[in-house]
Amino acid sequence: MRKTLDSSQRRLSNSLRFSRHDFGRPTLEVCRRLLGQRLVKLESDGTRLAGLIVEAEAYIGQEDKGCHASAGITLRNETMWGPAGHAYVYFTYGMHWMLNLVTEVAGRPAAVLLRALLPVEGVSKMRERRSAWRQSRGILAPAPWEGETARGVSNPAKLTDGPAKICQALAIDRNWNSRDMCRPDSLLFVETRPAVQGVTTGPRVGLNSVPEPWKSIPWRFRIERALYAELAAEEELK
């Protein structure tokens, strides 16, 4: 039976969402604020898939040599130049999709790459999709999240501990590029939660060929893994 959100649920959900104003602030501020917030995707049957954002990276302007925008505007990255609050989804390594959230003002290319989530809703569906992806690639080794629990998941964080894994688990691909995450009827959005502590910073991942200072600039934000259990305890896993 198809699940739907009634009007009161939609109003509540909308009131708790990241707004255009929230996304439009300076990128480093947005990146830090996103940690601990809930990324939500609504499935066609009304099912919610959600995870707490626990790792993210900032990419800011054409001057940032680690940013796609450094080479100028292209068909691939043009979403970064648009209004804040849109999804920027790109394909990489010939096999992976990556989800970014556009920040700052239109004309200023900047975004936050989501690197890791802590799944809290729709865990079984995420497991199903990640397992299907591994099977399609002929990966036979035991999955790192498997365990003897009701959901077959002993370590949910392993389902989405990388940007490509997030997109696999949530079924995000090119069709989600340029989606406005601030529309009231958006199926992909960020719900706000209280700000978290225990955030660490460091260099962004995979920029070995990028010149300094961009290679080492500490624009990667993470919640300490020791706090995952505390965060999960605040959520009702579904």
Image (cartoon, rainbow, N blue to C red):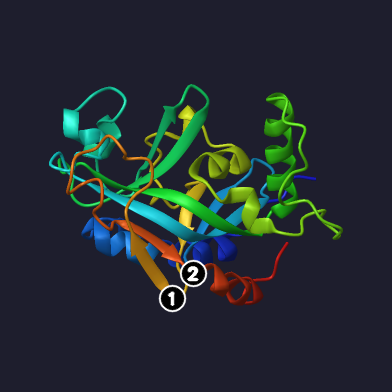
How packed mark 2 is, by other alpha carbons closer than 10 Å (few <14, some 14-19, many 20 or more), is few
Question: Which numbered marker is on residue 224?
Answer: 2
Q: Position of residue 49 (x, y in %)?
A: 63, 52
Q: Earlier in the sequence, mark 1 or mark 2?
A: 1
Q: Position of residue 133 (x, y in %)?
A: 68, 32
Quarter location, residue 156: bottom right
* Quadrant of the image containing the N terminus: top right
Quarter location, residue 218: bottom left
Q: Position of residue 162 (x, y in %)?
A: 52, 46
Check disc 1 and report its element: helix, strand or loop.
loop
Q: Which of these two is toward me, 18 or 115?
A: 115
The residue at 44%/41% (across/down) is: 99
106 relative to 191 in the view: left or right? left
**Badges 1 and 2: C-beta atoms under 8 Å apart?**
yes
How packed mark 1 is, by other alpha carbons closer than 10 Å (few <14, some 14-19, many 20 or more), is few
Check disc 2 and report its element: helix, strand or loop.
loop
75 relative to 184 in the view: left or right? left
* Quadrant of the image containing the C terminus: bottom right
Whole-Å distance between the Cαs marked 1 and 2?
6 Å
Quarter location, residue 150: bottom right
Q: Is residue 136 above or below residue 234?
A: above
The residue at 15%/40% (across/down) is: 107
Q: Position of residue 38 (x, y in %)?
A: 51, 62
Q: Is residue 226 above or below residue 31?
A: below
Badge 1 amino acid? Gly
Q: Is residue 208 above or below residue 47?
A: above
Question: Which numbered marker is on residue 150?
Answer: none
Residue 46 is at least partly visible in this image = yes
Q: Which of these two is toward me, 160 or 236?
A: 160
Question: Which numbered marker is on residue 198?
Answer: 1
Residue 5 is at least partly visible in this image = no
Q: Is residue 86 above or below residue 136?
A: below
